[in-house]
């Protein structure tokens, strides 16, 4: 039975979501301890998280980042915030989808099923752990790790997705549109600068491994990975 964790501080709405999702034979846990959310996450081990943004103490963006340090399970934000920037922030901080309040419960269920299929079901890759290698560089996307020799750096999910695309496309160019489509399901909420910011973070991850010049910007097209590594002093 797949596990769904609901992180919502409105008891009435949380109870409504809990009862509705549970009807579809999921094991559902509603969080009521917002100070130790990650302890609850580790103990329950959810397959998917429904996460509000406005929460006591720390917001949903913070908690999504904490989840991404340990897990790549799908995270769907549910929030009354309707601004485009809030939706961009949700995706930037590791979310997989965004639902605005008020919502129709059938939409919530459709998005839950879609994310579970993508992560674990018919659309998911084989269960065996994947790893990609190029001339000594190794990406472990399910661990969110990038390795070069004995050095290791941790990645966000978005950074891992970008590096995976660059490695898959090498020596070809990974197009900007292709990257946006892979990283964000709804490109309407992503401006041109969003990808640029993420590419800057990816380059910094390579620098943490002592590599410079790993990602070339191909003007008007996208980005290309260089596998003739230049060594640099670590940051």
Image (tube, rainbow, N blue to C red):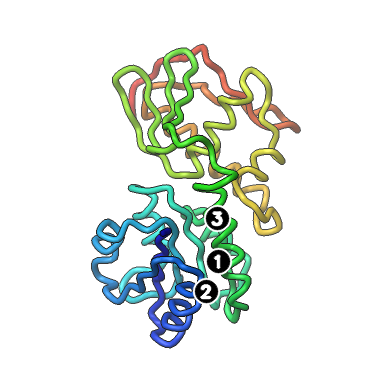
What's the residue at 29%, 20% (across, down)?
150
Task: Tell me: residue 121, above or below residue 98.
Answer: above
Distance from label 3 to label 2 (Cα)? Answer: 18 Å
Q: Which residue is mark 3?
A: 115
Say which quarter of the image contains residue 30. Answer: bottom left
Image x and y of residue 73, in percent: 43, 52
Q: From the image, state whether disc 2 or disc 1 is nearer to you.
A: 2
Say which quarter of the image contains residue 234. Answer: top left
Image check: 174 left or right of 94?
A: right
Depth order, front residue of 27/11: 27
Q: Which residue is mark 2?
A: 79
Q: Are marks 1 and 3 in contact (CB under 8 Å)?
A: no
Image x and y of residue 95, in percent: 50, 56
Q: Are marks 2 and 1 in contact (CB under 8 Å)?
A: yes
Q: From the image, state whether disc 3 or disc 2 is nearer to you.
A: 3
Image x and y of residue 16, in percent: 47, 83
Depth order, front residue of 161/32: 32
Quarter holding the N terminus? bottom left
Image check: 150 left or right of 74?
A: left
Q: Which residue is mark 1?
A: 86
Task: Tell me: residue 62, above or below residue 210.
Answer: below
Decide which of tag 1 and tag 3 comes sooner along the chain.
1
């Amino acid at each position: 039975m797949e596990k769904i964790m609901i992180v919502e501080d409105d008891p009435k709405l949380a109870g409504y979501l809990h009862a509705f999702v549970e009807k579809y034979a999921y094991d559902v846990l509603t969080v009521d301890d917002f100070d130790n959310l990650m302890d609850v996450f580790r103990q329950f081990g959810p397959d998917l998280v429904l996460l509000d943004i406005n929460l006591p103490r720390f917001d949903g963006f913070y908690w999504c980042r904490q989840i991404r340090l340990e897990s790549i399970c799908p995270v769907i934000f549910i929030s009354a915030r309707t601004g485009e920037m809030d939706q961009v922030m949700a995706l930037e901080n590791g979310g997989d989808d965004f639902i605005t309040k008020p919502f129709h419960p059938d939409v919530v269920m459709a998005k839950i099923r879609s994310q579970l299929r993508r992560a674990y079901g018919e659309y998911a890759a084989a269960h065996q752990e994947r790893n990609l290698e190029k001339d000594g560089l190794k990406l472990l996307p399910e661990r969110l790790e990038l390795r070069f020799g004995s050095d290791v750096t941790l990645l966000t999910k978005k950074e891992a997705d970008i590096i995976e695309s660059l490695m898959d496309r090498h020596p070809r160019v990974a197009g900007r549109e292709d990257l946006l489509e892979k990283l964000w399901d709804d490109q309407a909420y992503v401006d041109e600068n969003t990808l640029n910011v993420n590419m800057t973070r990816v380059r910094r991850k390579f620098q943490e491994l002592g590599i410079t010049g790993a990602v070339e910007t191909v003007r008007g097209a996208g980005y290309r990975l260089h596998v003739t590594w230049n060594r640099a002093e670590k940051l």
